[in-house]
Image: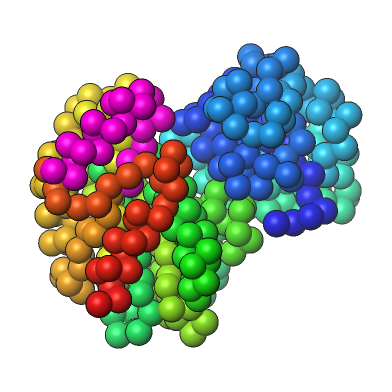
Amino acid sequence: MNEGRRIVILAEGAFGSFSSKTGVGALRYIPDEVVAVIDSTKSGNVVDDIIGYGNGCPIVASLEEALQYRPNTLLIGVAPRGGVLPEEWRDIIREAIEHRMTIVNGLHFFLSDDEAFASLARRKGVVIEDLRKPPRELPIASGAARHIDSHVVLTVGSDCDTGKMTVTFELFKEARLRELAADCIPTGQTGMLVWGKGVAIDRVAGDFMAGTVEKMVLESSIRADWIFVEGQGSLFHPGYSGVTLALLHGCAPQALVLCHQPSRKYIGEYLGDTSFPIPPLPQVIRLYEEAAHWIRTTKVVAIALNCYDLTEKEIAETIDRIEDETKIPTTDCIKFGAAKLMDALEDSLCD
């Protein structure tokens, strides 16, 4: 946690659980740093009214209104497809720079490469942090991660936006509660914001994606017995399967945790796409294990469900059905904690 940071999240017209993942991630994991959210379409509410948590953080209509909460950082809280900066946000960002606020940006569009923003930031002494900007020197994978002694766990998804980042962090927290020497490797902009480290793998050139995560795993293995790697994309998504495969091969995991939203039937359904059905879970599991096996034999040893839209009765029935269908320990770690998932990992990897 950055104790001096006071964040206002820019999510104009888009604040919500799926539509502003970066902002929502900040509200879940660093809520004490967030002082306001900008979304004029929901102003007057608190974030808890929209996403169900957030320490009563207010939603305001403008940056001017947010200034009463003394923010020193503007976070671009939305990551739309393609990572393009909405044109109408430029004035808000300029206003934030004028008020000497640090700009934290998770878009594919780098604000520090925009001369108008960059020159104004230089004049005002403002830092622009483009979270997705990759390091300069990146390696090509060699398969070295399969030889380390640490237990490497990768979260994977039946689709995008199924909770891989959340499950990764919850597993890490549970491991720490058990006094295990654990580390977490963020591979996306939200995780980097929360943890202050990592690389946004989806912005790394294709030849170096696997090598970049391999390098982070090797470095982590020096200090950690358990390494939890944040997954990205989905092997079944036509647009984002490449980054998933790079993570599978780069980190050479000993175990996989499958993240799944049981109410979702189609890839990208949360965005209105119904072109590609999600395969049955036994097939999803088999294909992930086969793809990983090209580098290292691994198993899906636990299933983490995202049941935010189900009733308590439906959740219990769904967990029982999936465990019966797959014979794999299953739970919703936000509702019930990650202990069951961590028990499955220890049983599998510590025999």
Q: Nearer the viewer, residue 320 or 95?
A: 320
Residue 131 pos. (x, y %): 59, 54
Residue 163 pos. (x, y %): 40, 43
Residue 201 pos. (x, y %): 44, 59
Decide whether the magenta segment is chiefly helix, strand or loop: helix
Does 199 sit above or below residue 182? above
Q: Residue 42 sits in which quadrant?
A: top right
Does 65 sit above or below residue 74? above
Residue range in magenta is: 304-324
- Residue 186 visible? The answer is no
What colouring method underlies this structural image? rainbow
Q: Residue 295 vs residue 252: left or right?
A: left
Q: Residue 286 sits in which quadrant?
A: bottom left
Residue at x 25% of width, y 77% of height: 351
- Quick check: is 11 in the magenta stretch? no
Q: Residue 128 vs residue 15: left or right?
A: right
Does 317 sit above or below residue 147? above
Residue at x 31% of width, y 31% of height: 315
Q: Residue 58 vs residue 22: left or right?
A: right
Q: Nearer the viewer, residue 101 or 94?
A: 101
Q: Nearer the viewer, residue 304 or 117?
A: 304
Q: Quadrant of the N terminus?
A: bottom right
Residue at x 31% of width, y 25% of height: 313
Q: Residue 116 vs residue 178: left or right?
A: right
Does 85 sit above or below residue 184? above
- Quick check: is 313 in the magenta stretch? yes
- Residue 334 visible? The answer is yes
Residue at x 34% of width, y 55% of height: 341
